[in-house]
Image (tube, rainbow, N blue to C red):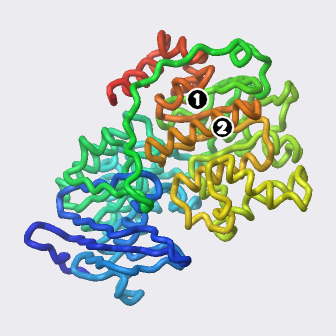
């Protein structure tokens, strides 16, 4: 595997032709997939959720969903068919020629390893200078303590760049990325895009990425492969103009807070020292109200959400529900308190057990909280699936048998199974195509109206926040930069951080 990979006259190192992949029950996961990857060029896979983008990317590395099989077509990677190789040969191909970074790169980083160890574990060159060069390549600070941190002490954007550095450490001929800019603010998204462009040109890497961001694809990709839904062409999404925030009903804007936080502080522990990440942040949302939380990557949004639901111990401040203080950790809260405040994380695979069917995942909260009699549980599962726009037969499927959008809807249904009063949604649309993202946000807005839910929505997509929230909280470096009615903050931002976010969103139009 040390020889240079075979390259066709036109520079092609990967060719997929007519690939069809079927699920164990015969359903097509990908039909007639085609992809040519050339050295020094960037190829983008586009199309709605469920069209087979992830299946096509993973087929290049010889990995299909459990039980799935190739029924037609060919895959040629550096002159080899990954599906025809022995296990040892396939491992060698992956180690020396291919690098794959999935939708949730943080889950692929060993939480016990430091950044330095994560890089040297797979690197061709393992010296300190090589680690510094890799961090510099992906625009991470090499002079501070970042190399000594563990993944849990990194922001989502930093985790993505560490995963990318880890992939580059092997000096691959082919770099495959599944939604590499999902969940990133516009500035960081553009930085990652420019980085991929530079890597392709400087190192003659064939880069392929799936992406829902049409603007980024237009600026980044040399070649675009559009996959269509398996059920037919379907409607194409036409981006709507940047919306004007709506006027807020007095009930939603001025009602007493159902969930509130005051003066929250939080930190990470690194080498025995506490590093503050939240500095006296507060929020409030009434029953039936909706709060948007925005800010650049690393500003503290996810830490704030995890502190509110008790998954990250706050070092100061209070969280109250109906005016009653909640313990700092979920383990110390009562079952009823945990039921009433539910978190929907950015990565739905974090809440959906891969070894359990969707139906089993939805039944568990019904059993745990005892709000539905045994005889009615199957009917309640069907009702929950219907509420989130999934057919009843999806109860028998496993998470890996769903598309990203379908998993996110199932994750929403699981949270609703607890019959909560508050839904905390952390970047739930970041890996979805524009049409599916709109549908999920409309679903949440409808649930809010029908069930008088309080919603806390974290998102980098200000289009989705603008006309679906009553109030807005802007975070900057762990501080509450600005807080107030969404319409006022969009029209007259008072803090530079708010103005910068709105400016970047407008420039992406």
Q: Quadrant of the N terminus?
A: bottom left
Task: Check residue 293 in the rendering and tell me which mark sits there, or answer none.
Answer: 1
- Choose top left, top right, bottom left or bottom right for residue 458: top right
* Residue at 37% in and 57% down: 228
In the picture provided, is 283 more to the left or to the right than 77? right
* Residue at 45% in and 80% down: 69
- How crowded pointer 1 is (Cα within 10 Å; few <14, some 14-19, many 20+) is rated as many
Residue 407, image x, y percentages: 58, 56
Task: Check residue 54 in the rendering and tell me which mark sits there, or answer none.
Answer: none
The residue wearing badge 2 is 305
Residue lying furthest left: 9
Q: Is residue 59 above or below residue 489?
A: below
Q: CA distance from mark 2 to mark 1?
A: 9 Å
Who is closer to the viewer here, 484 or 449? 449
* Residue at 59% in and 51% down: 408
- Would residue 245 be seen by someone viewing this image from the given angle? yes
Q: Quadrant of the C terminus?
A: top left
In the picture provided, is 372 more to the left or to the right than 16? right
Residue 221, image x, y percentages: 24, 49
Who is closer to the viewer here, 29 or 209? 29
Q: Helix, strand, or loop for circle 1?
A: strand
- Would residue 101 be seen by someone viewing this image from the given angle? no
| Residues at circles 2 and 1 in contact by the CB criterion of under 8 Å | yes
Residue 361, image x, y percentages: 72, 61
């Amino acid at each position: 595997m040390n020889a240079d990979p075979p390259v066709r006259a036109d520079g092609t190192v990967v060719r997929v032709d007519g690939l069809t992949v079927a699920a164990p029950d015969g359903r097509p996961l990908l039909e007639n997939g085609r992809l040519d990857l050339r050295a020094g060029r960037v190829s983008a896979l586009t199309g709605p959720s469920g069209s087979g983008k992830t299946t096509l990317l993973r087929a290049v590395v010889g990995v299909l969903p459990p039980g799935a099989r190739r029924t037609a077509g060919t895959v040629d990677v550096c002159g080899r068919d990954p599906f025809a190789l022995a296990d040892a040969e396939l491992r060698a191909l992956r180690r020396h020629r291919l690098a794959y970074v999935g939708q949730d790169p943080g889950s692929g980083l060993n939480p016990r390893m430091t950044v330095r160890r994560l890089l040297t574990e797979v690197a061709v060159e393992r010296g300190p200078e090589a680690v510094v060069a890799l961090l510099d390549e992906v625009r991470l600070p090499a002079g501070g303590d970042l190399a000594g941190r563990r993944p849990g002490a990194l922001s989502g954007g930093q985790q993505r760049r560490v995963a990318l550095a880890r992939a580059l450490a092997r000096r691959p001929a082919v770099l495959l990325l599944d939604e590499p800019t999902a969940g990133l603010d516009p500035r960081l998204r553009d930085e990652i895009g420019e980085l991929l462009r530079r890597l392709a040109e400087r190192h003659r890497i064939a880069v392929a990425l799936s992406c829902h961001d049409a603007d980024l694809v237009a600026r980044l990709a040399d070649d675009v492969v559009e996959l269509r839904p398996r059920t037919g062409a379907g409607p194409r999404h036409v981006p709507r103009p940047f919306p004007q925030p709506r006027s807020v009903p007095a009930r939603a804007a001025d009602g007493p807070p159902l969930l509130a936080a005051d003066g929250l502080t939080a930190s990470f522990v690194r080498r025995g020292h506490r590093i503050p990440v939240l500095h006296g942040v507060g929020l409030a949302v009434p029953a039936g109200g909706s709060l948007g939380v925005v800010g650049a990557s690393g500003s503290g949004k996810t830490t704030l959400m995890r502190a509110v639901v008790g998954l990250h111990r706050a070092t100061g401040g209070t969280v109250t529900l109906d005016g009653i203080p909640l313990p700092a950790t979920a383990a110390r809260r009562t079952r009823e308190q945990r039921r009433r405040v539910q978190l929907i994380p950015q990565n739905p695979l974090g809440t959906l057990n891969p070894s359990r069917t969707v139906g089993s995942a939805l039944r568990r909260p019904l059993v745990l909280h005892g709000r539905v009699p045994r005889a009615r549980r199957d009917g309640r599962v069907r009702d929950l699936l219907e509420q989130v726009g999934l057919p009843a037969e999806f109860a028998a499927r496993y998470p890996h048998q769903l598309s990203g959008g379908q998993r996110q809807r199932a994750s929403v249904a699981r949270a609703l199974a607890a019959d909560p009063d508050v839904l905390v949604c952390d970047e739930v649309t970041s890996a979805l195509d524009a049409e599916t993202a709109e549908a999920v946000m409309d679903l949440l807005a409808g649930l809010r109206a029908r069930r008088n839910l309080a919603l806390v929505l974290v998102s980098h997509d200000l289009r989705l926040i603008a006309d679906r929230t009553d109030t807005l909280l802007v975070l900057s470096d762990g501080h509450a930069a600005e807080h107030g009615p969404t319409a006022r903050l969009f029209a007259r931002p008072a803090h530079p951080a708010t103005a910068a976010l709105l400016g970047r969103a407008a420039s992406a139009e």
